[in-house]
Image: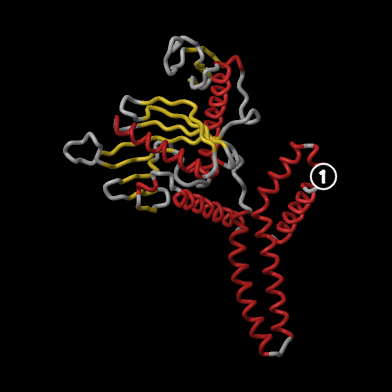
Amino acid sequence: MLEKLQTIINKYETLREQSLQPEIFEDMEKAKKINKELAGLEKTYDLACAYKKALETEQGALEILNNENDPDLLDMAKEELEEARAAIEKLDYDLKIALLPKDPNDEKNIYLEIRPAAGGDEAGLFAAELLKMYLTFAQKKGRKPEIVEEQLSDIGGVKFVMVKIAGDSVYSLMKFESWVHRVQRIPDTESNGRVHTSTVTVAIMPEAEDVDIQIDPKDIVMDTYAASSSGGQNANKNQTGVRLHHLPSGLIVNIGDSKSQMQNKEKAFAVLKSRLYQIELEKKQAEEKSLRGNQIGTGDRSEKIRTYNFPQDRITDHRIHESWSNLPSIMMGNIDDIIGKLVLENQTMLLNQEMQAGS
């Protein structure tokens, strides 16, 4: 591993030197690329340097223990050796995690889709609460959410909502939120105090780029419609909404949130590409899953991943069999600990697979 770590150290220091050259600012695209690489390597570089230093400390302590007779020096060397070996053990694990193969989609923006499933109006109301939770979480993390399409019920519930969330590594942050979320609580409309169970589906799709998906124009049927507006003389008269029908897949995308038909068309194609890309990802994940369990959960769209039990003030993630209390705080977007545990579980799973493959 030392040779690999030295390669990372050399690469990082070369990139850092390049980033400090005056001529780099003449090519902003190149500067941006170098700074992005540096940011991606920084954590591994710091770990690698600390690991090398701990190894040097260990070696120095061993030399003293093998060659010196002074009691004070020997006591100090024993202490240093113990600290160095503890550091080496921890850094060794952290480096193995840092060197795991990266998900190529981790740095992408995402499209978040939320749909009520079973439970009628109550499912729609909970879908609206999940939307608020994710929007707040994204904003707290410095990401930029933008509602692309939204259909609301008469009582304030969500029939369907699509949000684009842009920023640093959004997919890696939120990819484990996909599939079925179940809520158990007494609805406001329930007169007998019975607990109802409803479900909402969440989909997290990485934003596809042109290199990811190519769409043949012949496969698209496009038409326009009068998108809803805030009212006035021209309300619902302008054909600004865009509907795309992708014939091979049967996918249909409707976008009408912008006043510009051109902007809606661009957004519709971006969404369609991401949905097609998600289909390809799910096929690939299913193939990999048949060979080895490579992700948390089954990846099945019908899989119930989480239960929000309001009467017991408990949220349970069924993939990692862990529960949390203080549901009001969680619904205000404080889901960092849940996501952190999911990421850690996934990393541990991948590390075990790497070790088994290498044994």
Residue drawn at point x = 67 percent, y = 48 percent: 39
**Residue 236 as seen in the image, left or right of residue 74:** left
Is 146 above or below relative to 143?
A: above
Residue 45 locus on image (x, y percent): 69, 56
Residue drawn at point x = 65 percent, y = 60 percent: 47
Residue 355 locus on image (x, y percent): 58, 57
- Residue furthest front in the image: 232
Q: Looking at the figure, which quarter contains the N terminus? A: bottom right
Q: Looking at the figure, which quarter contains the C terminus? A: bottom right
Is 244 above or below relative to 80?
A: above
Residue drawn at point x = 83 percent, y = 42 percent: 23
Residues 13 and 48: in front is 13
Residue drawn at point x = 32 percent, y = 33 percent: 123
- Residue furthest left in the image: 192
| Figure quadrant of residue 5 | bottom right
**Residue 328 as seen in the image, left or right of residue 105:** left
Q: As shown in the figure, which amino acid type bears the numbered disc 1?
A: Pro
Coloration of the structure image: secondary structure
The residue to which callout 1 is attached is: 22
Residues 28 and 160: in front is 28
Decide if residue 253 is in sight here.
no
Residue 82 locus on image (x, y percent): 61, 76
